[in-house]
Amino acid sequence: MNKLGQTPSQTVGPYFAYGLTPEQYKFDHKSLATPVLLDANKNTQDLIILRGKVYDLHGEAVDDAMIEIWQVDQKGEFQTKPHQGFFSIGRMGTGTIEGNWFEFTTCIPAAEKPGQAPTIHMIVFMRGLLSHVYTRVYFEEFKELNQEDPYLKLVAEERRNTLITKKVQDSPVKIYEFNLHMQGEKETVFFDY
Amino acid sequence: MKPSSGPIFDLESVAPLDHDLTKNGIKNGEPLGERIVVSGRVLNENGQPIKNTLIEVWQANAAGRYVHKRDQHDAPLDPNFFGAGRCVTNEEGIFKFYTIKPGAYPWGNHPNAWRPNHIHFSVFGPNIGTRLVTQMYFPGDPLLDYDPIYLAVPEKARQRLISTFDLSLTEEGFALGYQFDIVLRGHHSTPFENE
């Protein structure tokens, strides 16, 4: 049977804010996916902040990228319904926090399958990119699991550190930093999904 | 390698006027410009409908101006047009938006560069691999031949980005109809660049 041709991707452009992340950018329109995946009113014990910047070839932090994260919760469940304490998809533009940060309130996910390390899937949408790109965020404290993770093992050892987030603060709230380098020597490893 | 199920947005998630951009930004009157209906089906490569998936759209107004604070194009904002909306596909994978036909606008890409009329689309589909952000164009737009964003797509796939005028979708006395079907990649399928 002949397959239908896929609809090609086109860039998200610079003007996505009022359509995709309206509340964050103070537009009077409800956001369906927000930077908050974990409801802090229901669960503070597992709460972490995952923040970072998107650097271009010149080392400048981009102020109009959009980041989506997709992840399972701390029990390994992919929560597909919004508004139930945890939602598995977060979204944030890099244009509202001074310094051009993205910053998600979430939890460290459980491993999706035995033999894998906890991972947050991250998608970068940006002006100048014809198609979004995918990467994976690992946590430095799971050294042994990371060693055995089948996807991390696909990556040359010297480049694995581009996928590992580091804890930069332990209390009062755990903060992890994960910076993306779109091009250049420190280029983040991106995956074909 | 991927979360195997995408988000499930239902009617609770979407407000009643979210699919009607001719009404969802009204402050004190009707938005200016040509009213249109944009409808189509979201399908996988086997032609099966993808139901209950979220489609988000955003666009310039009839004068070619975005509500976005960064847009400095010297064309008027329309106080009654916001320019963003969304809807969820039904059991047959069908979506439908009412909106205003967006205007062309200049951008700094090259001398005398103008973007063709277009509507931005964001679609989830059943899993993280089917995620799609794209742009829908209009048939017969002379600017398509000069637009580096449209032309970046391999030639044989470009037609898939252009909606078709559809008299059967057109609502008499109210709005012109354009059909735009969206085909998402399957699980572990080849990315479009190679097809």
Image: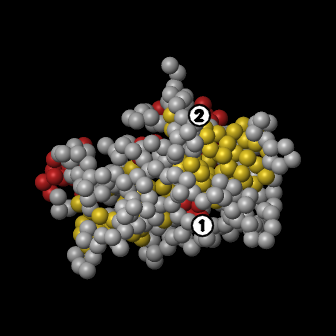
Give how far across and how far down residue A11 sits, in percent: 55, 51
Write down the chain letter for disc 1: A
Amino acid type, label 2: Ala
Give how far across and how far down residue A128 sits, in percent: 53, 54
Asked whether disc 1 touches disc 2, contact meaning CB atoms under 8 Å apart, the reply is: no
- In depth, the one of B146 and A121 nearer the eye is A121
Label 2: which secondary element: helix
Residue B151 horizontal side relative to residue B26, left or right: left
Q: Is residue B122 visible?
A: no
Q: Same chain for marks 1 and 2? A: no
Label 1: which secondary element: loop
Amino acid type, label 1: His
Q: Residues within 10 Å of mark 2 (few under 14, many from 20)?
A: some
Residue B11 horizontal side relative to residue B186, left or right: right
- In depth, the one of A133 and B183 nearer the eye is B183
Residue drawn at x 31%, y 43% is: B1
Q: Which residue is mark 1?
A: A29
Residue drawn at x 73%, y 47% is: B37
Residue drawn at x 69%, y 39% is: B179
On residue B157, which mark appears? 2
- In depth, the one of B94 and B55 nearer the eye is B94
Give how far across and how far down residue A26 sits, in percent: 57, 73
